[in-house]
Image: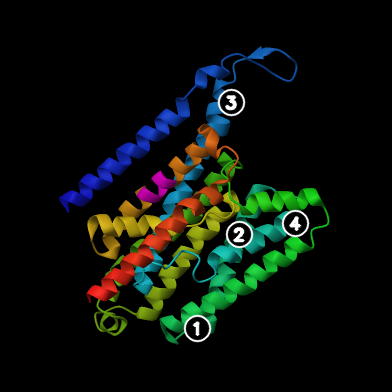
């Protein structure tokens, strides 16, 4: 427990330190800039409150939400390769967002609500297909629905009439925090908090699953109810962040796995560490894109994939070694 508290404190200090430094880094450069009328103006407050702070907040909230969702999914399926979008919620949010972007000139607030609805509907479809048929059927249903939604996204992109609209959709799909808005972020917070509440209420369910689903059912837990509430919370978390950022992969896969490797604790004890790691990873990735010339033309979804894919291979190799040892 002491090691866990020390690690969480270290991660929190790192997160706060990097956040503070990124907010005020070279802020003085904006003290005297010419506006559209050619008049020198102090733009520091505008840059700080309208650009940097919303982007910083979105990075932290998105990274933490995806990591919390990933920890829940890995706990439910007892598999370090389980990701937040396994049951269709990520592709559901993406498909709905692409549809809204394609057909409507909608504000980000409507895009956010549409993404949440899409995530919940796709998750409910997977759940209704595989309800009472075990986790294997649930995973297969998730794969099928994900393939269907990916086809829908491809269809929308292939029918785009305007090359500029197509380019905008592709940019959104690659993931970015450049669209961060304070009002949209604040609108998403109640949804995210509700998702976190669902995970918190069912945290002991994940611990009991380590003994097997049948054993969990004999220890005062309703497996079906707990599974639904937990995965519903995951869908809320995913649906609340994807419309604001586009597709950002691997954070929800890597952060919980690293937390488990560092602490070797029960799934319910890894939520805080996973959330802090996810927020820190996404924040560092975004700052790399903003300030490092080598990454300046890369979207954050691409960068997380470049980092996450080798990590996924490493996780697979680790699993193979553990199987050989057993």
- Residue 267 lies, with reference to residue 43, above or below; the image says below
Mark 2 and mark 4: span between their CA atoms? 14 Å
Q: Are the residues at dot 2 and dot 4 in contact (C-beta closer than 8 Å)?
A: no
Tell me which numbered mark, 2 or 4, is placed earlier along the sequence. 4
Question: SS class of the residue under badge 3?
Answer: helix
Between residue 94 and residue 317, name the one nearer to us.
317
Kindly tell me whether residue 173 is visible in this rendering: yes
Kindly tell me whether residue 193 is visible in this rendering: no
Stretch of the chain drawn in magenta: 277-281
Write down the residue under mark 4. Answer: 102
Name the side, left or right, on which 301 lies relative to 217: right
Circle number at residue 46: 3
Image depth: mark 4 or mark 3 in front:
4
> Quadrant location of the N terminus?
bottom left
Circle number at residue 70: none
Between residue 104 and residue 307, name the one nearer to us.
307
Tell me which numbered mark, 1 or 4, is placed earlier along the sequence. 4
Mark 1 and mark 4: span between their CA atoms? 31 Å
Residue drawn at 40 percent across, 30 percent down: 20
Name the main secondary structure of what is drawn in magenta: helix
Crowding at mark 2 (Cα within 10 Å: few <14, some 14-19, many 20+): many
Tell me which numbered mark, 2 or 3, is placed earlier along the sequence. 3
Tell me which numbered mark, 4 or 3, is placed earlier along the sequence. 3
Q: Quadrant of residue 39?
A: top right
Give percent across and percent down for residue 54. Answer: 53, 38
Circle number at residue 115: 2
Mark 2 and mark 3: span between their CA atoms? 29 Å
């Amino acid at each position: 427990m002491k090691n866990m508290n020390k690690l969480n404190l270290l991660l929190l200090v790192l997160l706060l330190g990097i956040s503070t430094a990124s907010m005020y880094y070279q802020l003085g450069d904006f003290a005297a800039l010419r506006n559209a009328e050619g008049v020198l103006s102090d733009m520091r407050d505008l840059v700080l409150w309208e650009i940097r702070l919303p982007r910083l907040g979105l990075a932290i909230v998105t990274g933490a939400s995806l990591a919390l969702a990933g920890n829940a999914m890995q706990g439910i399926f007892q598999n370090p390769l389980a990701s937040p979008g396994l049951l269709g919620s990520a592709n559901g949010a993406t498909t709905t967002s692409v549809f809204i972007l394609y057909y409507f000139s909608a504000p980000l607030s409507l895009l956010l609500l549409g993404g949440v609805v899409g995530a919940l509907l796709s998750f409910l479809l997977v759940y209704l297909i595989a309800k009472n048929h075990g986790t294997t059927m649930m995973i297969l249903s998730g794969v099928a629905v994900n393939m269907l939604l990916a086809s829908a996204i491809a269809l929308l992109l292939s029918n785009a009439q305007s090359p500029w609209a197509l380019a905008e959709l592709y940019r959104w799909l690659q993931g970015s925090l450049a669209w961060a808005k304070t009002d949209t972020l604040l609108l998403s917070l109640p949804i995210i908090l509700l998702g976190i509440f669902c995970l918190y209420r069912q945290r002991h369910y994940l611990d009991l699953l380590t003994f097997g689903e049948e054993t969990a059912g004999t220890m005062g837990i309703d497996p079906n109810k707990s599974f639904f509430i937990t995965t519903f919370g995951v869908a809320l978390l995913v649906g609340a962040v994807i419309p604001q950022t586009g597709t950002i992969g691997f954070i929800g896969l890597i952060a919980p796995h690293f937390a488990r490797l560092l602490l070797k604790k029960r799934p319910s004890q890894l939520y805080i560490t996973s959330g802090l790691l996810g927020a820190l990873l996404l924040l560092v990735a975004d700052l790399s894109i903003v300030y490092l010339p080598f990454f300046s033309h890369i979207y954050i979804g691409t960068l997380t994939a470049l980092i996450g894919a080798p990590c996924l291979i490493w996780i697979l190799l680790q699993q193979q070694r553990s199987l050989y040892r057993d």
